[in-house]
Amino acid sequence: MIISARGLNDLTMRKKILLIYVICTFAMTGCRLTTSGADDSSQDNSLSMDESSSSDSSIEDSDDSSTDSSNGLIGQADDLPWESPMSDYVPESPFSQYIEFVKGEKTTKWDDNHFSDYILGKYKYVCCDISGDGVQELIVSFNTDDAERLIAFSYNGEEDTIYVVLDQDTNSEYDRISKNGFVLVNIYKDESGNMISGKTDEVSCTQWIDAVMTDGYNHGYADYVYEWKREAGSSEFEGPSEEIYDQIMEMADDQVTLYEGVNPEDMIPYLKECEENFENSYEDFKLFKQQGNGLFYCNNSDVPDNEYKDAESAYEAFINDETCVRCEYVKEPFNSNFSYVYGDKYHISSWYVPEYSESVETRELDCGSDGSKELLIDITSTTAIDNVYVISFYEGHLYLRFTGESSARSRFDIGDDGYIYSSGSSSAYTSGEKEAFFDSNVDFHFIYVLHVVSSEDLEEYFPEAFEISGAGEGSTIYIYEIDGEEYYVPYSLWEPADEEDYTDFMNACIECGISFSKQEEVDALIEEKKAEYGF
């Protein structure tokens, strides 16, 4: 099994996962997909559950009567579609890039493979969102000499890159690609430690049943959102409750339809049709999730999604655990593994769990200095890590706009005006800093990103120059990223290096086509950028 897995924000977050499932006819696949008739005999939906080991899928209910203490409460709203900060946003369509990929004009990140390097001969394919962000992945199933294999590809527009986000052996008779936004897989390990895909009645095998989503922003990873495990020789599963199991199986049986191809170009007409329908499919996706359908990390119906007259009343209610915050378009967390999908609804007790949290602090921000207030929540864990959330009020409701993680090794601070400074280190020879800000729409922007690299870490950034001379002594390069451009400033110890003081490594960089900048030139660019945004 080749899938990489990344856990949720912490163990308690996995325990707090809640699910709402309502049967709905909206298709999340973007085009031409119809429900396959599931063969009941191919999937055993019964489960003997060890209730003592089940995940706790509920939290202490809030006292709904306490919401009346807020004079700004209008009531529990069911406004559809959401009038939200990102309501007009449509992400970049991936389909033209998928077409380039299957034509052999684009390769994947990391392994630098063409489509034909993965698939030879007959295959089945579909485009389906399995990341929870409404942007479809390209999913391909095919047979190798000894196994059936499932691969999902995703496109990152900011990097203009195709990623492999799911790659594993599978058995289409039992595994499922669900219209509800996940892949259900059955995995077994025999007594010799060999992994077996599909389904077997051999009780001597350890069995896992996983509901898997890929990561919409952390490309190359997948999340086991729900997992059940049965130890070898046991008839009982450990994992979430039998009720959740039944709901997952019902959703899994609502499958996409896979299309057949022989040559890579066979799927191009389908991809072009998906391209034409992308905006409509994205609007259908948003409404589908806003109605509480599909798979979520957290969508707790016990805490109401109330409507408020003003921000102050809404923020107070959220702090008192009387209302929730909505999640929209998935934005990449800042130094954090926090996971969420479109339509998730978090409440403060989802984040502040006494067993794992030491303190919670709240304060108001004025991002963009426009007079409207945002709410910052800083929860310090028992491991001295601060989990920071920024929430905004819009048309009666609260929306999550930013999440980040701050620690001793990678610290960031947010000023009252929304200005962000971050510094930290990733190794003994690489450190850095970032300056960023929230504008008046609470959109996040970098001013610059700096990597300070020395010694053996220089090989990662300048492999050709490193091969010529090695790092040597006294070579440090400051790498600035500003508006998508990179600027390189050579340093000797703690001072910018003059040309006559360049080391052999620096001269090797020049030989390889690297142009060095003066520190004062970069400083001027940064000050220009700050002034442009009013800082």
Image: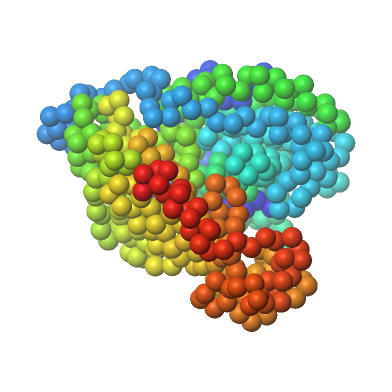
Q: Position of residue 18 (x, y in %)?
A: 40, 39
Q: Residue at x 27, y 27 (%)?
A: 396
Q: Nearer the viewer, residue 303 or 207?
A: 303
Q: Can residue 306 be seen from the camera position used here?
A: yes
Q: Position of residue 26 (x, y in %)?
A: 53, 19
Quarter of image, res 474: bottom right
Q: Is residue 216 above or below residue 338?
A: above
451 w.r.t. 178: above or below: below
The answer to which quarter of the image holds residue 324 is: top left
Tell me: 285 left or right of 114: left
How did the renderer colour the structure?
Answer: rainbow
Q: Is residue 180 left or right of residue 439?
A: right
| Percent of width and height locating residue 392 | 32, 37
Seen as rendered, the residue at the extreme bottom is 473
Q: Is residue 241 visible?
A: no
The residue lying toward the viewer, choosing from 123 and 393, is 393
* Residue at position x 56%, y 54% in the image: 481
Q: Residue at x 67, y 60 (%)?
A: 515
Number of numbered markers: 0
Front residue of 486 and 309? 486
Q: Nearer the viewer, residue 2 or 275?
A: 275
In the rendering, at what x and y percent does residue 401 appear? 39, 40
The image quadrant of residue 128 is top right
Answer with left or right where residue 396 lies relative to residue 71. Answer: right
- For image coordinates 29% across by 40% down, the residue present is 369
